[in-house]
Image (cartoon, rainbow, N blue to C red):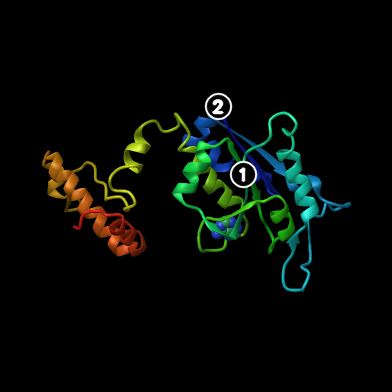
């Protein structure tokens, strides 16, 4: 069975959005993955199909109700219970979450799929997160207006790793000796553009020299921009430059 993504949101029209195009779109057409979007408001309460309420303890903004969210989650996660249990992790996109890493993305891509809950307003009642044993994930230290774009980011990162979606190109680059360094800079024709020449080594045809140049460039960029990654790289036993 192919990789399955369920998304729970109050803005269903935001999906598949960019995932309907390009690589992810083609992979969806080819059946490598599927997407089902559920409108949380379908489980809303009262005439206004309300999904949120004011926070206990006071403060600004609104909080998404646990009963409404649980009903929405149950409509997708429990649907397969009794036959084959739904083994997909439930992930809540929130700036309070643990940072998303390539390692976690790889694990998710290797599994059966994901159920993504997109938060809006000030937050989500913690009890439904705890009761459903949801994993809280953040895509970075900045605040989006909701979890929808974060969900798109997570899905995009996972889909490109699905078997057959990008072919051999990925593992060759990603699992290369240079991980976890940032990538070296890229150049193509023309060899001279706007009075700027491509680094000489890259046009030399000397493959060993090219590999050495790229590794040195990757190290230098990483050292400057991401000292955290660089220290990890050195600590992992990489040969000193
Ligand atoms: N929702 C709002 N900001 C977010 C972030 N940085 N990551 C995940 N979900 C979010």
Question: Along the horizontal axis of the image, is 190 left or right of 37?
Answer: left
Of all residues, the one furthest to the bottom in this rendering is: 58
- Mark drawn on residue 177: none
Q: Is residue 195 above or below residue 24?
A: below
**Mark toward the start of the polypeptide (1 vs 2):** 2
Instruction: Indicate the position of residue 27 as horizontal and vertical percent values.
Output: 51, 31
Q: Which residue is mark 1?
A: 89
Marks 1, 2: nearer the viewer: 1
Instruction: Indicate the position of residue 31 as horizontal and vertical percent values.
Output: 55, 26
Q: Which residue is mark 2?
A: 31
Instruction: Tell me which corner region of the image, top left, top right, bottom left or bottom right, holds residue 222.
Output: bottom left
Instruction: Tell me which corner region of the image, top left, top right, bottom left or bottom right, holds residue 170.
Output: top left
Would residue 213 be visible to someone looking at this image? yes
Of all residues, the one furthest to the right in this rendering is: 47
189 or 74, nearer to the observer: 74
SS assignment at label 2: loop
Question: Along the horizontal axis of the image, is 180 left or right of 31?
Answer: left
How many marks the image carries: the answer is 2
Quarter placement of the C terminus: bottom left
Residue drawn at the location 35% of the way across and 43% of the way down: 174
- Within 10 Å of disc 1 (Cα), the crowding (few <14, some 14-19, many 20+) is some
Instruction: Indicate the position of residue 78 as horizontal and vertical percent values.
Output: 74, 38
Would residue 198 be visible to someone looking at this image? no
Residue drawn at the location 36% of the way across and 32% of the way down: 168
Residue drawn at the location 67% of the way across and 51% of the way down: 133
Given contact means CB atoms under 8 Å apart, are the residues at marks 1 and 2 in contact?
no
């Amino acid at each position: 069975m192919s990789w399955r993504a369920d998304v729970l949101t109050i803005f269903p029209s935001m999906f598949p959005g960019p995932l309907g195009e390009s690589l992810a779109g083609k992979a969806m057409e080819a059946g490598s993955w599927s997407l089902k979007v559920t409108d949380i408001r379908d489980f809303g309460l009262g005439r206004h199909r309300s999904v949120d309420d004011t926070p206990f303890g006071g403060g600004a903004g609104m909080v998404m109700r646990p009963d409404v969210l649980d009903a929405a989650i149950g409509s997708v996660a429990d649907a397969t219970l009794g036959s084959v249990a739904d083994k997909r992790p439930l992930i809540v996109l929130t700036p309070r979450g643990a940072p998303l890493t390539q390692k976690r993305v790889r694990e998710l891509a290797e599994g059966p799929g994901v159920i993504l809950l997109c938060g809006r307003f000030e937050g989500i009642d913690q009890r439904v997160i705890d009761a459903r044993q949801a994993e809280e994930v953040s895509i970075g230290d900045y605040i989006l207006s909701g979890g929808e774009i974060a969900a798109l980011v997570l899905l995009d990162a996972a889909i490109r790793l699905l078997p057959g979606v990008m072919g051999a190109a990925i593992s060759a680059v990603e699992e290369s000796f240079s991980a976890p360094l940032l990538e070296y800079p890229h150049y193509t024709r023309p060899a001279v553009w706007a009075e700027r020449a491509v680094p000489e080594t890259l046009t030399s045809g000397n493959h060993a020299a090219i590999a050495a140049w790229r590794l040195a460039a990757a190290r230098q960029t990483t050292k400057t921009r991401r000292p955290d990654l660089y220290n990890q790289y050195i600590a992992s036993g990489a040969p000193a430059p």
